[in-house]
Amino acid sequence: MECAATGLAAPWGPEMRPRGERRIIALADGGFDLLEAKTAVGVIRYAIDPVVAVVDHLHAGKRASDVVGVGDHIPVVATVGDALASHPDANTLLLGTAPRGGILPASWRAQIVQAMRAGLDVINGLHAFLSDDAELAPVAAECGVTIWDARRAPDAHRVADTRAHALAATVVLTVGSDCNVGKMSTALEVDALLRKRERTSVFVPTGQTGIMIAGWGTSIDEVISDFTAGAAEDLVMEAAKTATTKEDIILVEGQGSLVHPGYSGVTLSLIHGSAPDALILCHQSTRTQIRRYTLPIPSLADLVVLHGAMTAHVKPAPVIAISLNTYGMSEADAHAAVARATAETGLPATDPVRYGPAILADAVEAFAKARAATM
Amino acid sequence: MECAATGLAAPWGPEMRPRGERRIIALADGGFDLLEAKTAVGVIRYAIDPVVAVVDHLHAGKRASDVVGVGDHIPVVATVGDALASHPDANTLLLGTAPRGGILPASWRAQIVQAMRAGLDVINGLHAFLSDDAELAPVAAECGVTIWDARRAPDAHRVADTRAHALAATVVLTVGSDCNVGKMSTALEVDALLRKRERTSVFVPTGQTGIMIAGWGTSIDEVISDFTAGAAEDLVMEAAKTATTKEDIILVEGQGSLVHPGYSGVTLSLIHGSAPDALILCHQSTRTQIRRYTLPIPSLADLVVLHGAMTAHVKPAPVIAISLNTYGMSEADAHAAVARATAETGLPATDPVRYGPAILADAVEAFAKARAATM
């Protein structure tokens, strides 16, 4: 499988309808919202293949944009059967939510079987692998369709060895105050603008949604913890085959947060394995507590200091910009949040989805230029 | 399987000769030294079952203590065959090294087969699971012996949820400046002394050697990274069934280091999952660089600050004492290293193996008493 954007071939991947030829039904039954359905929303926003319908009986009859702010022309329907009836050209079913623990909702099984019997490939981002499933895998074989478990990590048992510490290209990692605040979107938005500016820039996917969008990558949270940093290192080394000069940029999709009680280890493995030269700190402005926990989120200034401390002793990487997610805020409140972030940290800040990523891309280019001047 | 020290039953474990009835041959061929063979050395020092012989042809003819400083009466022999000949009462083969990446050395296969054919159970701490091995597993079945892959983690997919944040018992975690500096030994030494002082204290094993010694636990570096903190949390909750009051102590075996490029994510998962109230910082005094890397180890004072920063936002846990490994140093140098550690950090310090763990146990008891007074 090849990533059209970068020419990077993934070392693993399914034989299925290729990117560019998929017409996707996104199954998000019972969970089509911005918190649970970040996979569906990410694919709607950034994938090159169209999502032709979303399945969630709770929102049937609406447009996707009514629920999640994107997808003006995408109907939400009650069942996979309804989606197949209204979109007989659909050829791919995407499981579009990320339930905690990654278990397959039992109620989805019949709908997945129905889709496979209609000839659809299945793209799955859950921890639960459908291609190992005693009920679903045989149906896929019988129907001649492919199940792609995007989270299935390569069976690499490699401890990180600082190979990514001294690349020519500038490596930028998005980090965050919590899960699901915009780390992938920020990396994708900045990457796209840099390429529009005719930079060589490579987006490095580290989670299932980024992998579905870019067509390669590793879901690093699925890797055995001793080898998680090694997996992140491998991804950056793969990107460095394309981003070869000191003018080039590698934008690594962040995961979790250093202050997340459940996922902080994934985050630190990614920081030390991908060995960034600089960080973009992402935050959702309306959020004050770690989602699903009662822990307060530290101030942006404290988070800048914390990331500086955690990178200082392995490979120093300053936070060079703040990316805010101001979804749901008024224009005045969003504007004020951006101004506050800059006042608090002294760093350039913006919401790359609301205002465009130019300020963040400018910060990356300025940093890369200064870095290149010292090489 | 039950841990004699605590009465804790492990929720998983093999059917093999129980603790207390094993007579162990430790296979460490080509790697019987303090760096590679920490599993063998830990079992020699702390397990209740005797190691009757060590196999390493490089040191054949010596005593274990000649090579690693412990095991005065344990001969080192060239082959498993020699060990079986001189110790026909041996009933357990323990794979005693931890090669990087955890692969089984090819040259060991014939010796493992020979041991199984002689009726020995096999205890394995490698990432590579022998009970999945196409050659070795059938031999074990044929011979009616058991392979215990101590690193095999339970198939729990649970994200940490801060359940261990508010226990009555005081939770103390050993952290370190690097791998293999004494985190397990420190926890075991302090735990043993606290129990001798008639405290209720529970040692929580988080790695293969600790598991082999205590007979329960989870090798958390073998857990999928999204669930590593959850696995650490589960272990502490298990210990909290025994350590139930505010007078009780839970001593968690640390892993890796926050400044280790390969394993830092394991460390942070353990910190945030086990949710300690206090930390003991472990360091090998002669070491200046992360082992196998060219990265300098930060000063003890910097490490105290870093651990404070990384715990502050999730559950604050001060470093309350310094545990030094002064192996190989002269008495004068060791004494000076301890004095320097206290001068640098203002904290009590000692080498618990050389001088005994009283200073560390005192620090834990004083901390627990002060904490209990506020509850």
Image: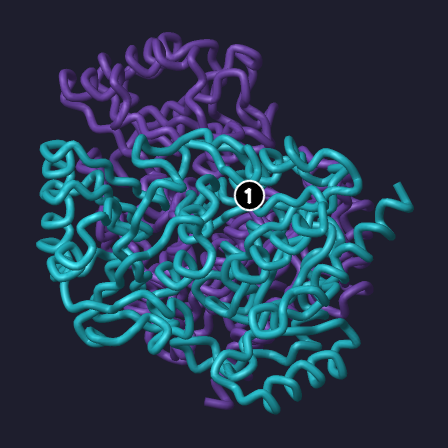
Chain colours: A cyan, B purple
- At label 1, the amino acid type is Ala
Numbered disc 1: what chain? A
Of A52 and B180, the residue lying toward us: A52
Of B136 and A20, the residue lying toward us: A20
Picture quadrant of residue B130: top left
Residue B7 in sight: no
Q: Quadrant of the N terminus of chain A?
A: top left
Question: Is residue B175 shown above or below A341?
Answer: above
Residue sticking out furthest to the right: A374
The kind of secondary structure element at disc 1 is helix
- Total labels: the figure holds 1
Question: Is residue B265 shown above or below B331?
Answer: below
Residue shown at 72% from the left, 67% from the top: A359
Residue B249 percent across, percent down from the top left: 43, 69
Residue shown at 26% from the left, 27% from the top: B132
Residue shown at 77% from the left, 37% from the top: A168
Residue A26 percent across, percent down from the top left: 28, 58
Of B269 and B322, the residue lying toward us: B269
For label 1, the residue is A232
Of A264 and B266, the residue lying toward us: A264
Residue shown at 60% from the left, 70% from the top: B363
Residue A354 in sight: yes
